[in-house]
Amino acid sequence: MPNLSQQGSLRRSLLLAGSMTPLLIHTPASALAQSRQPGVKTELNASSLRIAFGSCAQQRKPQPIWDTIAAARPDLFLFLGDNLYVDARDEVTFRQRYAEFQSVQSLQEFREKTPHLAIWDDHDFGDDDVGGDYELKALSQQMFCDEWAEPVDSPRRTRSGVYEAYRIDSVGRSVQILMLDLRFNRTPLRADPAQKKGYGAMVMQAKLSGKPMTGWYLPNLDPQATLLGEEQWAWLAERLAEPADLRIIGSSVQFAADGTGWEGWANFPLERERLTRLISGQRANGVVFISGDMHYGELSSWPVEGGYPLWDLTSSGLTEVWNIPTPNRQRQSVVVAEINFGLLEINWADAGGSLTMSIVNKTGKTKLSKLLNIDQLQFTKV
Ligand SMILES: [Fe+2]
């Protein structure tokens, strides 16, 4: 039976039709938005949990994908960023883009009937590829928290970033959801100016040749460079020290992909190493990543010495598609260059528990899938 006992937490109660027990999402400080977080209309076997996710939804484009996602009957949907394209340098434009977002009927109907949580990426934080020096970030934080119905006393409104932790307990097993903020504190990216200038030619050449196209970002090896900022790092270390059977880390940009030249943790190798060390140092079991941003879907994995591979399922986009091949040294799957969403199916009835990670296209067809036993996501006992 779903249950929660985290000290000081407020309960998010998501009523599941067909189930006598509510699904409870626990978070230290945030409560479910009253207006936009309804009871779930799906059937729930308490020993299974379906979490869908996606990214990159341009509010000026049709979004029929929401009907397909609803048909997959997710218990929860995670918005992983670029949930709208604000792309603004002034407040009037900023607010206008949010108004456009609010008028996307299929999306808002989906939000009315499906519990959901959100983080942002560059385009809904403010503008293409921006980070901590974005000049409207205080406004952006307020708009985000209002839109996603954070309570007035939520720490997401006042701390340096909209990161947050949630927990779903069911049949004696616990799923932790760690939603990161990779924008609010991020130091500037390093770019190759020559490549950036030649963007049009790069695209043309890639289209003609059919060969992979690498972006212009370079790894930043400055020890002061950061993606998370120290406050979020301290928070994350505390969360990873908490017990959980499965930990889903929501990262707006790819964690495991390498050599793309576009945005991702690969831009900050020392930060990725730091997180890998944190996970292995705390022997945190059950970690998987989900990510967005790229305008295609794929599965990658990052090796951990003496541990288990860190799988990273990327889903993007809900409206956006990039069909020029992009390199990724850590790729473990086909590339899904069409409109898609991600689906995590957790089943605690299987011995030890299982996780199926899938990418599904707009007609509901599964385009890639990976089945993991939860005991494959564990450090060996010492
Ligand atoms: Fe993005």
Image (tube, rainbow, N blue to C red):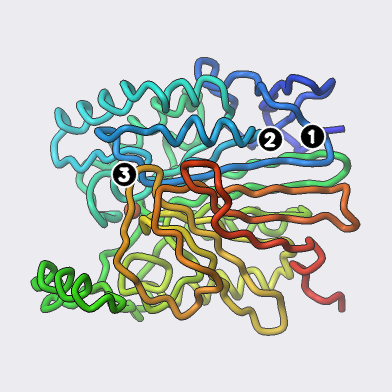
Sooner in the amino-acid sequence: mark 1 or mark 3: 1
Residue 69, image x and y in percent?
A: 53, 36
Q: Residues within 10 Å of mark 3 (few under 14, many from 20)?
A: many
SS at mark 3 in the image: helix
Q: Residues within 10 Å of mark 2 (few under 14, many from 20)?
A: many
SS at mark 1 in the image: loop
Provide the residue designation for mark 3.
Answer: 125
Rendered-image quadrant of the C terminus: bottom right
Q: Is 233 on the left-hand or right-hand side of 277?
A: left
Distance (Cα) linking label 3 and label 2 = 25 Å
Q: Is 298 on the left-hand or right-hand side of 51?
A: left
Q: Residue at 45%, 65% (x, y): give it.
A: 335
Q: Amino acid at mark 2?
A: His
Quarter of the view holding residue 195: bottom left
- Cβ of mark 2 under 8 Å from ligand 1: the answer is no
Provide the residue designation for mark 1.
Answer: 4
Query: Is the C-beta separation of discs 2 and 1 under 8 Å?
Result: yes
Which residue is at the far right? 351
Which residue is at the far bottom? 305
Q: Amino acid at mark 1?
A: Leu
Between 362 and 55, the one lying in front of the other is: 362
SS at mark 2 in the image: strand
Residue 375, image x and y in percent?
A: 82, 65
Distance (Cα) linking label 2 and label 1 = 7 Å
Provide the residue designation for mark 2.
Answer: 26
Residue 190, image x and y in percent?
A: 24, 73
Above or below for 266 versus 154: below
Between 359 and 286, the one lying in front of the other is: 359
Q: Residue at 74%, 70% (x, y): give it.
A: 283
Q: Residue at 56%, 21% (x, y): give it.
A: 113
Residue 93's label in the rendered image is none
